Image: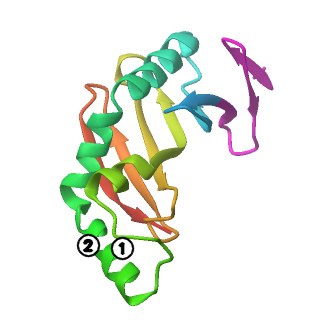
Amino acid sequence: MTETKIMIGENEFVLYESGDYVGKMTVWGRETDIFLDIDVNENRVTDVVFEKINWLNDNRDVVVDAFMEENDHFVDVINEMIESGDFDADEQISQEDFEDALFVNNVLIFIRGRNSEFSLDLDAEPDYLLGHLACMEIDSNYEVECCGING
């Protein structure tokens, strides 16, 4: 029988109808939704979750750099929108302003032993992604790839 709740440290994760466990943990200083897709034979869930979340918290620059490699044009787009009055801001933004606005909206961890991978959606505040989320995938070797803009 599958447990309806599991604890990861002091964080409670509840089994949803989708089959994922859903809970919250702190990522980049914000409380973040975490989804766990657990292989039925996996028994190292807590270790894998802490490993992935700790890596994210220690490697913000790696994730942001991977996003900016393909998406640095957003800075120019936002500045053009500010200039035309289509984006409400007091002044033009820099790349640093844009990068500082990024945060992790949610994380999905695929727990598969040594091959555990995860993905996340980047968001921004102010909304420099214009209502969209950026999908980032991190493989079991911690290679980060931007997989596009969603929504």
Label 1–label 2 contact, CB within 8 A: yes
Residue drawn at x 59%, y 28% is 26
Q: Secondary structure under badge 1?
A: helix
**Residue that carries the numbered disc 1 in the rendered image:** 78
Q: Which residues are magenta?
A: 1-24
The three-letter amino acid code for the residue at tag 1 is Ile
| Residue 81 is covered by the magenta coloring | no
Residue 63 picture quarter? top left
Q: Is residue 146 visible?
A: yes
**Residue that carries the numbered disc 2 in the rendered image:** 76
The quarter of the image holding the N terminus is top right
Q: Nearer the viewer, residue 12 or 45?
A: 12
Q: Is residue 107 above or below residue 59?
A: below
Q: Is residue 112 visible?
A: no
Residue drawn at x 48%, y 45% is 103
Q: How is the image coloured?
A: rainbow
